[in-house]
Image (cartoon, coloured by chain):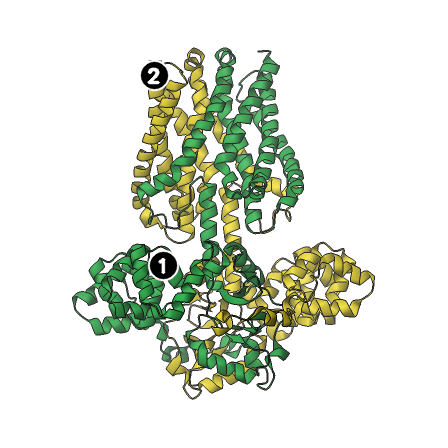
Chain colours: A yellow, B green
């Protein structure tokens, strides 16, 4: 702690150099300039010490093909592999076509298997062949195994590099093993204890570093270990990692044999993707893996039209109901003026409920068995909300002197019914969707409000005809 | 790898015991039973080896106070502290009142400082005093410092426990230091190199374990180090950790002095919270930290009513516009029937755009400077979408023999205008909100659709009166 809280006289501070602020940021422009001035040595040096692969991938996306390849060739093996893993598929293809077989081999050697698999999944067959040619036999076997796991399964995002220890090893042995094999592992902070390939426990590196070297793994290993199956959903795996604050989760096959790990960094990306996907679906947009700007206009249109069409056409029901009451409207046209407000309120009430429930399902709080609890809660909320809104709205109507208090009553009654219906529909449909294996997120705003619209108009005119005897 | 891919004959597999499946799950019911049968020793043992603090906190939430305290007293120091950190504020208060000062001291000693601060932030003053009394002087100083950081800042979620190394230390020295101080650190996987408290670089434990013990830290330290300031927004910090796949990010004050770290597990929780918050706001619900079921009915109502009221009243504009055209409606009441469909389509188009942009802002893809690009993209999308929808809808009207082709034209024209307006409004408002320091998420569905409704109805009747000369 003393490093953190002792006070250090100002002048002393001045002396010490700011290693961290030493360098000028390496922007895309600076890279271009250095390329044009042929300062390859300097650029190579800068790229190695002053750039992160994920940033470089973003920068290179703006470069033309020739420049991109030039820069890529300047990268050290490891950086090259990592940068490659962060690129989009177009950039990757350009590179694969530009690189020589031996260059390609180097990249493939350095890449982590889970990244390699991601790359292969989106490449055209001929490129895949060329890439597989560039990898050695053993790796190829593993790649093929990984490619067989269903998309979005734990197996498809897991990393097959991890440290496996035997329970009879000593702490010293274990540290030695880490020293030997550790360097090319994506994570070595948790080691897994296996016996005949079966996962039997784990040991934190923390533990190894802080207990006597003569102890055996069996003495210090944690046997109450969390794990997931290769076929588990990647989102569930990510949620487990979040909930328990893990750095990695071991993945086993159905014989409990350890086959890989999912690391926290991959878990975070999975959650970010899944959330973007949910949010798109909730807005009635069919999701795609690419970013907003990364998605072309036509792809955007394709993603948005289906729901719009569906919702537009289903709005026909509402229209037919209203046409059925044309006479009433001809007599009291002011009745039409309330419809937008009624439908809007109903729709908003419904989407409030559905959104909260959808989120509850996503983070694992709400399950189908809770449907009764949800309804009970939503009904009580609905009653209080509708009471408040009807009163305020009734006053508004009277104050704005839209005369006839019976209208105020009609609207109030309609609103109350609508809100209750909306909250029940909004609260339950996501759970039903989940139950029948649909993504709860599709039961969000657009669909809910269209459903609610219909019931709103129906209830409205039923009450109208009752009150005004039409 | 051999552990992973060698084939092992089935019978051998049989022999090996499944350490992991050995135990029966420790459910709330089992705990209750063991309490009633006074099997305290067994329960203590089970709790230590067969239960995770986060799960226990969930289970205890269902227990009555007396049972909760009994179970808590059976926990080992560390488990007790962790479980306490996962409890909700009510449970914590119960415990604080039930525990003796010395018991409380033990818990406080074991808790990580960042958790302690979270606990204190939501406790009533008198409880806070009692808790602070239970902590030693040094800790109290640190706590007070942490309490001063603004809510949602990096400082408020950072952990002040980390390993600091000097650049003149050897690898051997460093490992020794970790051995000595490591055990009570929340994370030791990245060590930070400081000089007069200033952050000058970092060393991965991976590095320490895999390089020769005689090397000095200066030789192996990474100086191109990412860091954040105590005042940075916690969401930005979490996004950085995600983007670069870090396990921890060092936090410095404005003199570049290292004051703490934010660990990946906290980052994941921050992102989950922020996303839940965004999603609530997007649905027109004022967010709160608690879960769906954890929030009482009245709190739900308080959270949902403000927007509903606002939106209901703003719908009055639409109503006034429509009343203004009462005559038109009296003559052609069927015109009213199209309004829900038109408004629904406009609203959905708008919320599609706003949602995509809001998400783009959240994940850091879209910034205010991109507003032009967004408008350009949305307009092109809008034109294609409106073309498609108008045609389909025109056909529908003609097919359903709602006679007068002029109506089809009117609706088509209205729809086209609405969609373009909706997409521009939906695409730009979130960016404007962000620009003026509001949360972009409030520009989601409810607000957008209400705004779009007004313009839809206006456009509609303008076109109607133009076409039908009214």
Front position in the image: B206 or A182? B206
Label disc, if present, on residue A319 of the rendered structure: none
Residue at x-position 41% and y-position 39%? A352
Residue at the location (58% across, 28% down)?
B418
Q: Quadrant of residue A125?
A: bottom right
Badge nearest the viewer, 1 or 2: 1
Secondary structure beneath dot 2 equals helix
Q: Secondary structure at mark 1?
A: helix
Residue B298 rendering spot, x and y as whole percentages: 31, 41
Chain that bears disc 1: B
Position of residue A347 relative to residue B93, above or below, is: above
| Disc 2: CA contacts within 10 A as few (<14), some (14-19) or many (>=20) | some
Spot occupied by residue A410 in the image (x, y as percentages of width and height): 34, 21
Asked if marks 1 and 2 touch (Cβ < 8 Å), the reply is no
- Per the image, the residue denoted by label 2 is A405
Position of the C terminus of chain A by quadrant:
top left
Question: At which x and y percent is residue A60?
Answer: 71, 58
Report which quarter residue B369 is drawn in.
top right
**Chain letter for mark 2:** A
> Which is nearer the eye, A431 or B122?
B122
């Amino acid at each position: 702690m003393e490093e953190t809280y002792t006070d250090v006289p100002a002048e002393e501070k001045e002396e010490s150099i700011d290693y961290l602020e030493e360098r000028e940021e390496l922007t895309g422009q600076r890279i271009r300039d250095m390329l044009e001035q042929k300062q390859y040595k300097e650029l190579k040096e800068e790229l190695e010490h002053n750039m992160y692969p994920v940033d470089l991938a973003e920068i290179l996306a703006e470069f033309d093909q020739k420049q991109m390849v030039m820069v890529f060739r300047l990268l050290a093996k490891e950086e090259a592999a990592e940068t490659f893993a962060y690129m989009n598929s177009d950039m990757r293809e350009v590179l694969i076509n530009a690189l020589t077989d031996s260059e390609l081999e180097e990249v493939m050697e350095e890449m982590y298997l889970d990244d390699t698999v991601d790359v292969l999944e989106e490449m055209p067959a001929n490129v895949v062949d060329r890439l597989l040619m560039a990898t050695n036999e053993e790796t190829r076997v593993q790649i093929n195994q990984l490619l067989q796991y269903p998309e979005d399964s734990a197996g498809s995002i897991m990393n097959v590099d991890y440290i496996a220890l035997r329970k009879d090893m000593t702490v010293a042995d274990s540290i030695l093993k880490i020293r030997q094999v550790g360097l090319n592992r994506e994570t070595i902070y948790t080691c897994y204890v296996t016996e005949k390939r079966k996962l039997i426990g784990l040991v934190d590196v923390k533990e190894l570093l802080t207990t006597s070297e003569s102890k055996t793994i069996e003495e210090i290993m944690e046997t109450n270990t969390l794990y997931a199956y290769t076929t588990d959903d990647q989102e569930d795996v990510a949620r487990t990692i979040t909930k328990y604050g893990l750095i990695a989760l071991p993945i086993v096959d159905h014989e409990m044999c350890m086959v890989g790990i999912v690391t926290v960094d991959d878990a975070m990306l999975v959650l970010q993707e899944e959330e973007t996907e949910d949010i798109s679906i909730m807005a009635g947009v069919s999701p795609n893996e690419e970013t907003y700007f990364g998605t072309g206009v036509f792809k955007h249109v394709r993603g948005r039209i289906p729901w719009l069409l569906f919702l537009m056409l289903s709005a026909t029901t509402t229209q037919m109901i209203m046409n059925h009451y044309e006479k009433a409207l001809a007599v009291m046209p002011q009745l039409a003026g309330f419809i937008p407000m009624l439908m809007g309120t109903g729709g908003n009430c419904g989407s409030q409920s559905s959104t909260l429930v959808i989120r509850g399902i996503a983070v694992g709080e709400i399950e189908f068995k809770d449907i009764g609890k949800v309804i009970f809660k939503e009904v009580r909320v609905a009653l209080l909300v509708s009471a408040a809104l009807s009163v305020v709205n009734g006053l508004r109507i009277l104050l704005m002197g839209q005369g006839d208090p019976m209208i105020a009553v009609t609207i109030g009654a309609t609103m109350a019914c609508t809100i209750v219906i909306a909250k029940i529909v909004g609260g339950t449909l996501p759970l039903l969707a989940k139950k029948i294996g649909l993504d709860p997120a599709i039961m969000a705003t657009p669909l809910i409000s269209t459903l609610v619209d219909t019931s709103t108009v129906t209830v409205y005119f039923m009450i109208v005809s009752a009150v005004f005897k039409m």
